[in-house]
Image (cartoon, rainbow, N blue to C red):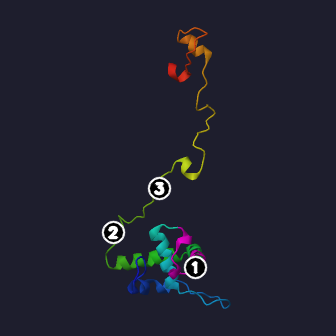
Amino acid sequence: MKRHELMDEQWALIEPLVPCSTARTGRPSRDRRTILNGIFWILHTGAPWRDLPERLGPWQTVYHHFAKWRREGVFAAIVEALQIKLDERGLIDWDLWCIDGANVRAARAAGGADKKVSTGIPMNRQTTHWAAAEAGLDRNSTWLLTVAALR
């Protein structure tokens, strides 16, 4: 048994909920348990789909089944069935049951956006002549002040 793969008892619980392939042409269908193990491997590791180990099948096939089963509500049915099983054993406190919905917002640059914020105000404020006059400097002074320095 490899890491991140279903044990026999776990597979026996959810096997009836995972749909069988109905295709009658083409290649023989992949083992549903192997496909599910591939999906769980990706979800556990957070790796890109292309990094799926070859022993779990082609990443395109595993992703196709993941997307299809997600649309069809297979994973929701599995969670519901497991919740019912745990509730029968008295292992779920429904007052405390929740799914973590926390998220962390990344900086703009993390998504490839420009690091400079476009607010209409230049990031490097231009030197103004009146700022020099307000500071008591002569017009021909070589001192350069910005508006921000006078505030």
Q: Measured from the top left, where is residue 39 in percent x and y?
A: 51, 75
Magenta-colored stretch includes residue 4: no
Upstream in the sequence, badge 2 or badge 1?
1
Amino acid tagged 1: Pro
Q: Distance between the Cα atoms at labels 3 and 2?
A: 24 Å
User: Are the residues tagged 2 and 1 within 8 Å (C-beta)?
Assistant: no
Q: Which residues are magenta?
A: 48-63
* Residue drawn at point x = 42 percent, y = 81 percent: 6
Q: Write down the residue under mark 3.
A: 103
Amino acid tagged 3: Asn
Q: Distance between the Cα atoms at labels 3 and 1?
A: 31 Å
Q: Quadrant of the N terminus?
A: bottom left
Amino acid tagged 2: Asp
Q: Write down the residue under mark 1.
A: 58
Upstream in the sequence, badge 3 or badge 1?
1
Q: Residues within 10 Å of mark 3 (few under 14, many from 20)?
A: few
* Residue drawn at point x = 52 percent, y = 85 percent: 32
Q: Write down the residue under mark 2.
A: 93
In the rendered image, the vertical position of residue 61 relative to residue 116, given as above or below: below
